[in-house]
Amino acid sequence: DVKVTQSSRYLVKRTGEKVFLECVQDMDHENMFWYRQDPGLGLRLIYFSYDVKMKEKGDIPEGYSVSREKKERFSLILESASTNQTSMYLCASSLYRVGNTIYFGEGSWLTVV
Amino acid sequence: QKEVEQNSGPLSVPEGAIASLNCTYSDRGSQSFFWYRQYSGKSPELIMSIYSNGDKEDGRFTAQLNKASQYVSLLIRDSQPSDSATYLCAVMEYGNKLVFGAGTILRVKS
């Protein structure tokens, strides 16, 4: 089975803090994604990556950056956390092949106070 | 911007009935479509994928695709209380990215 692991499930951070959300997948997938999910808005894509050291902006990249130094690991960084970044963050991965299934991690609940 | 629209619900059906969930999408060139189920506080899990016009069945689930009408649906037969969840329709666009609808809440009453 595909395993996408988000190391931090629940975090509480203060406004202005730098926040790191880590994601690791064990299936040698090329593609990795970060989404956030808010009530009534569904899942929105923040950033994605096709390969090591590659990254592309999704629909809502403002206030976020990412890092992919190894194929299996994709990190989401909030440079200066704000209260409007309180949300559930979902990491996902897939093979590069078009139409391939995307698998999600268990999610990270971030509260910024 | 490419959009995926779903009725937010909640859709309430009695146990044993057929639940019908609908989704429309804006990008006529889309080729891959997915239904995910999400329980409260959990991450989405894939139920069905469909790529060709027509019906695709998997157990109690049937996905239906009509590309001409830009319409995808999910039928759940013999609905069970354990089917109560939010169902997310997703359309794959360039780069293997998924665009999601906001989800439909399904409640199955025993």
Image (tube, grey):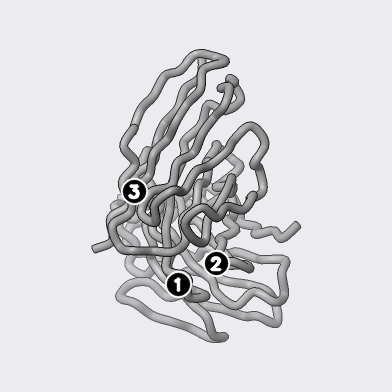
The answer, for residue B46, to whether it is visible in the render is: yes
Q: Which mark is residue A24?
A: 3
Q: Position of residue B34 (x, y in %)?
A: 49, 67
* Secondary element at tag 3: strand
The chain ID associated with circle 1 is A
Camera sees residue B107: no
Camera-near label (1 vs 3) is 3
The residue at 34%/62% (across/down) is B79
User: Badge 1: few (under 14), some or many (20 or more) residues near its Cα, within 10 Å?
Assistant: some
Give the residue number, with chain letter if any, for mark 2: B96
Which residue is at a point 49% across and 39% down the rendered structure image?
A76
Query: Could you tell me the amino acid type at mark 3?
Result: Val
Give, as a three-letter code, the residue at label 1. Answer: Asn
Q: Amino acid at mark 2?
A: Asn
Residue A99 vs A67, above or below: the answer is: below
Say few, some or many: other residues with alpha carbon within 10 Å of mark 2 (under 14 / 14 to 19 / 20 or more): many
